[in-house]
């Protein structure tokens, strides 16, 4: 159970996530939650990957993916998407076959060990791209028109809030800067962590960003982007909204 958010910005990509991992099966009341450092990792200095779902499958597909990475990053975005999908499916397909065989013996919970979603952000042809892969290794490329994506059990709460942030804060456009994206992602994560109802989303949010710097693209964790400033901005925005009671509760006009 997880929430991972990706946002495409004018100057890069932001990825954020919670830090709670569930081990075991909630369906059999044998699950436990543990807080980890992060579900987001930086690879090759300029690639960010994040996952939701089965930890073991995510580890396997990431290992498979980066054995072929040097060839993938030299391609156009279309062929790169296809090759990443092919590498993911090479791990998913045999695992799916085994899970279906076990499901006949132990039930549908056998499939819990293979379901996962995967976010990858990387520079291709000097542009930052954000790709989301589902359980079938099919991909979605996040674009300027809809510049955000969310995966995991917190998705249902996160997406409406991200749509609100896009409409009101980002002026219904793609956020112009990494800073704008970080504030939106962090605000959404904080909101879902506070209000989630048994979704298994919690812990301290972690965020990474891919941004072009001198010498090329570089991925960094949030500590490099002054998280306290973004948290202060969020508190200021929430305070401003809370003071608009007169707008949302106009006085009654008596008519003669």
Image (cartoon, rainbow, N blue to C red):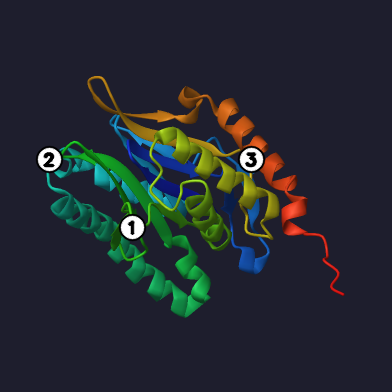
Residue in the picture at 43% in, 42% down: 15
Q: Is 191 left, or right, of 251 in this rendering?
A: left
Specify few, some or many for label 2: CA neighbours under 10 Å numbering under 14, 14-19, or 20 or more. Answer: few
Residue in the picture at 64% in, 57% down: 31
Task: Where is residue 212? Give x, y as percent.
Answer: 28, 29
The image's mark for residue 237 is 3
Q: Which residue is identified by label 1?
A: 133
Task: Where is residue 110? Give x, y as percent.
Answer: 48, 69
**Against 224, is 81 above or below?**
below
Q: Give SS at disc 2.
A: loop
Specify few, some or many for label 3: CA neighbours under 10 Å numbering under 14, 14-19, or 20 or more. Answer: few
* Quadrant, the C terminus: bottom right
Q: Give SS at disc 1.
A: strand
Residue 20 in view, yes or no: no
Q: CA distance from mark 3 to mark 2?
A: 42 Å
The image's mark for residue 242 is none
Task: Name the front one of labels 3 and 2.
Answer: 3
Label 3 with label 1: CB-CB less than 8 Å: no
Task: Where is residue 37? Give x, y as percent.
Answer: 54, 35
Q: Which residue is identified by label 2?
A: 74
Q: Residue furthest bottom?
A: 104
């Amino acid at each position: 159970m997880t929430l991972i958010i990706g946002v495409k910005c004018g100057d890069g990509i932001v990825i954020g996530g919670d830090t709670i991992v569930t081990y075991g099966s909630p369906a059999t009341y044998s699950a436990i939650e543990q807080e980890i450092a992060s579900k987001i990792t930086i690879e090759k200095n300029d690639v960010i990957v994040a996952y939701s779902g089965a930890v073991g499958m995510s580890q396997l597909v990431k290992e498979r993916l980066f054995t072929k990475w040097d060839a993938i990053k030299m391609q156009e975005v279309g062929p790169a998407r296809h090759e990443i999908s092919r590498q993911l499916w090479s791990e998913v397909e045999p695992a799916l076959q085994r899970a279906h065989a076990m499901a006949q013996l132990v039930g549908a919970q056998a499939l819990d060990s293979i379901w996962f979603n995967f976010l990858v952000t990387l520079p291709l042809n000097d542009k930052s791209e954000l790709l989301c892969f589902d359980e079938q290794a099919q991909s979605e490329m996040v674009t300027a028109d809809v510049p955000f994506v969310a995966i995991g059990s917190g998705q249902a709460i996160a997406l409406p809030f991200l749509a609100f942030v896009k409409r009101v804060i980002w002026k219904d456009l793609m956020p112009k800067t990494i800073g704008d994206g970080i504030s939106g992602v962090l605000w959404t994560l904080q909101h879902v962590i506070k209000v989630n109802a048994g979704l298994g989303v919690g812990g301290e949010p972690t965020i990474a960003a891919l941004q072009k710097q001198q010498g090329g693209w570089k991925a960094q964790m949030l500590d490099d982007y002054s998280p306290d400033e973004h948290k202060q901005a969020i508190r200021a925005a929430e305070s401003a909204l809370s003071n608009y009671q007169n707008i949302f509760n106009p006085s009654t006009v008596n008519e003669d």
